[in-house]
Image: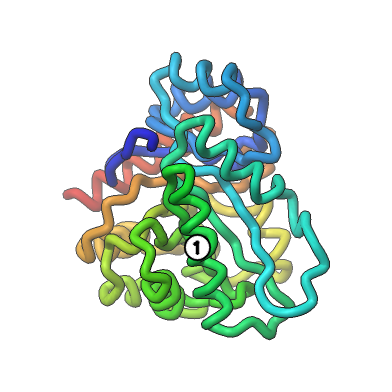
């Protein structure tokens, strides 16, 4: 089991800086004042040299992102997106000392709540076998799209190491909203992926999700209110910056962009604590 961070710790998702070589990723995280990293295991395998580079910089690996599992009928077989094979994700988590594995459930639209519960229970058992938690990331295009139902699913698994990943982008564009978290026990939230977004959903939401997210404080989200609601419910998860902004990254480079993300997020957290 890796080192557990708290709600004031910042974590840099490797995807936010387009998964550069590990030495560049580490430099960016240190420059931005981050404590931990979320890694894409398709890019960063369970290589001891990667783990050593991260530890030597005083950083920890928080999550591997992501294990992707088909639920429902008609499984075409993976990979479904850009992910590493499921076994490789958990192998990397164990080897690099991660505390968690983010998970995405995919289906053709006919998966049931019970199938989602079964899938998450199986993933949680696999995580427990290597000493990590698993977190289900919900969104409007997932079989379980909203915060309240997602919380019911992970609770129904009966696994203590099963929780939620709350990606602010997906909450903001619904279904559901941040007010829902007032009635979700904070211990069910294992990961927070922070970003910002325009008030109006982009015409091509899928493209914007991958390339046009906003730096915290530059969009229309009430980040302070949302974080206060989640924390008031007892959430102790660290803050992972998942901001896919290809234009800003190209202009500033990984190190400059990480500095911007870290500074912007600390301003938000200062208001949350104020």
In this view, 178 is above or below 271: below
- Residue 273 visible, this angle: yes
Percent from the top left, x then y, of residue 144?
A: 54, 77
Q: Is residue 27 above or below residue 215?
A: above
> Residue 166: image x %, image y %?
44, 61
Image side of residue 90 versus residue 195, left or right: right
Looking at the image, the residue that sits furthest to the front is 129
Residue at x 27%, y 76% (from the top left corner): 183
| 129 left or right of 209 in image | left
Q: Most extreme residue toward the top, as rendered?
A: 56
Number of numbered labels in the structure image: 1
Which one is nearer the viewer's eye here, 19 or 67? 67
Give the image's coloring scheme.
rainbow
Image coords of residue 153 (percent x, y): 44, 75
Residue lying at the far left in this picture: please name it: 274
Identified at 53% across, 31% down, the residue is: 95
Q: Is residue 117 above or below residue 192?
A: below
Which of the 4 image quarters holds residue 68?
Answer: bottom right
Disc 1 crowd rating (10 Å Cα; few below 14, some 14-19, many 20+) is many
> Is 58 left or right of 21, judged from the image as shown?
left
- Residue that numbered label 1 is attached to: 136
Query: Residue at 53% across / 82% down in the picture?
Result: 114
SS state under label 1: strand
Percent of width and height locating residue 107: 70, 74
Tell me the residue at 31%/39% (across/down).
5
Q: Taking the image as drawn, is residue 218 in sight? A: no
Placement of the N terminus among the 4 image quadrants? top left
């Amino acid at each position: 089991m890796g080192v557990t961070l708290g709600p004031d710790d910042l974590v840099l998702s490797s995807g936010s800086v387009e998964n550069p070589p590990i030495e560049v990723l580490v430099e960016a995280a240190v420059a931005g004042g981050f404590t931990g990293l979320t890694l894409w295991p398709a890019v960063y395998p369970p290589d001891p040299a990667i783990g050593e580079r991260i530890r030597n910089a005083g950083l920890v690996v928080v999550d591997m992102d992501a294990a992707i599992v088909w639920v429902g009928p008609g499984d075409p077989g993976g990979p479904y997106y850009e992910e590493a094979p499921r076994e490789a994700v958990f192998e990397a988590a164990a080897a690099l000392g991660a505390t968690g594995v983010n998970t995405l459930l995919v289906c053709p639209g006919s998966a049931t709540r019970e199938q989602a519960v079964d899938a998450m229970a199986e993933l949680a058992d696999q995580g427990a076998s290597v000493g990590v938690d698993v977190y289900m990331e919900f969104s409007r295009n997932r079989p379980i799209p909203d915060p309240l139902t997602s919380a019911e699913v992970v609770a129904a698994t009966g696994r203590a190491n099963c929780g939620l990943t709350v990606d602010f982008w997906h909450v903001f564009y619904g279904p559901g909203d941040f007010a829902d978290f007032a009635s979700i026990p904070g211990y069910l939230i294992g990961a927070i992926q922070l970003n910002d977004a325009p008030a109006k959903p982009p015409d091509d939401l899928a493209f914007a999700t991958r390339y046009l997210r906003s730096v915290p404080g530059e969009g229309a989200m009430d980040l302070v209110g949302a974080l206060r609601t989640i924390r008031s419910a007892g959430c102790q998860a660290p803050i992972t910056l998942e901001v896919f902004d290809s234009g800003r990254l190209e202009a500033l480079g990984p190190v400059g962009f990480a500095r911007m993300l870290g500074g912007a997020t600390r301003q938000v957290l200062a208001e949350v604590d104020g």
